[in-house]
């Protein structure tokens, strides 16, 4: 699982705690909303897991007074998804939902604490829904290959699945369909067809699709010019 991702409010909180000058303009009471998208990213990926169609997203709200954390366990909390009340309750400081918007749209979540001491608080986060991505990875260094077979691999990002083997893959290599029944994520090219010092260009197009979500589809294109080793 990826760590919760902080909204822009995180930066405001950091400045609030670290600068007495800016603290004078920061509200004494504030809400901080964090979120985590359950979309796939390969092992070792350290960036944000972005929101795509069909993704499950968990939101968490925290409250602060003059930089000090304040518990919301006895406060009424209301959550609004796309400007409509989604759920409310006492101490309801987290909410899980599924995003069904198409890529290019903004998913909005608003949280309100109407009975917070000192006055009602609210915070809205708006997150762009993006299409999944496919990276095409070539293992050989300096684009030089020996006179033998070589492979490239499709690596998916941000699909609404937990494992990459839940996806369906299609390949086109130099405008020709390619099928690898034993490992659909890879394409193997015969280096034996290349002579010494030969230079050849390959255009790989990989498409990955989540069969459970009809619009959860991503594509990657990469053109590689390879030179055989001497």
Image (tube, helix red, strand yellow):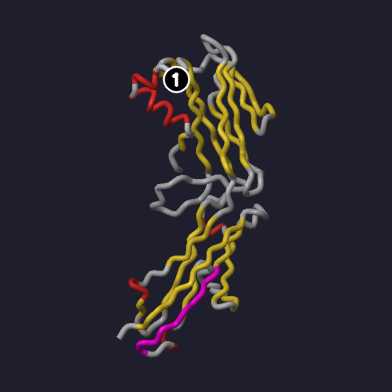
Q: Where does the N terminus fall, quadrant-wise?
A: top left
User: Extreme right residue here?
Assistant: 84
Image height of 184 relative to 52, above or below: below
Where is residue 65 drawn, in percent x and y? 44, 15
Q: Where does the C terminus fall, quadrant-wise?
A: bottom left
Where is residue 160 drawn, in percent x and y? 57, 49
**Splitting the image into 4 quarters, where does residue 114 fall?**
top right
**In the drawing, does residue 77 fall left or right of residue 14?**
right
Closer-to-camera residue (131/191): 131
- Can you identify the residue that label 1 sits on? 26
Q: In the image, what residue occupies the spot 66% across and 33% down? A: 82
Q: In the image, what residue occupies the spot 54% across and 32% down? A: 59
Which segment did they paint magenta?
Answer: 196-205
**In the drawing, does residue 179 fall left or right of residue 139?**
right
Q: Is residue 38 magenta?
A: no
State whether the magenta stretch is mostly helix, strand or loop.
strand
Q: In the image, what residue occupies the spot 51% across and 50% down? A: 40
Where is residue 53 drawn, in percent x and y? 62, 48
User: Extreme left residue here?
Assistant: 230
Q: Is residue 200 magenta?
A: yes
Q: In the image, what residue occupies the spot 50% across and 38% down? A: 36
User: Extreme top residue here?
Assistant: 118
Image height of 181 relative to 130, above or below: below
**Splitting the image into 4 quarters, where does residue 3 fall?**
top left
**In the drawing, does residue 68 fall left or right of residue 207?**
left
**Splitting the image into 4 quarters, where does residue 198 fall?**
bottom left
Where is residue 184 drawn, in percent x and y? 53, 68
Mark 1 surroundings: few (<14), some (14-19) or many (≥20) residues within 10 A:
some
């Amino acid at each position: 699982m990826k760590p919760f991702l902080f909204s822009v409010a995180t930066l405001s909180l950091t400045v609030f705690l670290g600068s007495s000058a800016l603290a004078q303009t920061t509200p004494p009471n504030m809400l901080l909303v964090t979120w985590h998208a359950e979309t796939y990213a390969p092992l070792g990926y350290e960036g944000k897991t972005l929101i795509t169609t069909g993704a499950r997203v968990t939101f968490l709200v925290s409250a602060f007074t003059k930089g000090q954390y304040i518990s919301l366990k006895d406060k009424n909390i209301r959550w609004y998804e796309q400007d409509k009340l989604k759920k409310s309750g006492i101490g309801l400081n987290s909410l899980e939902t599924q995003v069904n918007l198409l890529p290019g749209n903004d998913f909005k979540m608003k949280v309100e604490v109407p009975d917070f001491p000192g006055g009602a608080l609210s915070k809205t986060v708006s997150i762009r829904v993006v299409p999944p991505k496919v990276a095409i990875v070539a293992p050989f260094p300096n684009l030089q290959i020996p006179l033998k077979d070589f492979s490239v691999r499709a690596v998916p990002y941000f699909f609404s699945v937990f494992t990459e083997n839940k996806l369906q893959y299609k390949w086109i290599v130099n405008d020709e369909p390619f099928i690898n029944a034993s490992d659909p994520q890879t394409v193997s090219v015969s280096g034996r067809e290349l002579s010494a010092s030969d230079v050849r260009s390959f255009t790989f197009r990989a498409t990955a699709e989540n069969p459970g979500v009809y619009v959860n589809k991503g594509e990657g294109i990469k053109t590689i010019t390879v030179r055989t080793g001497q």
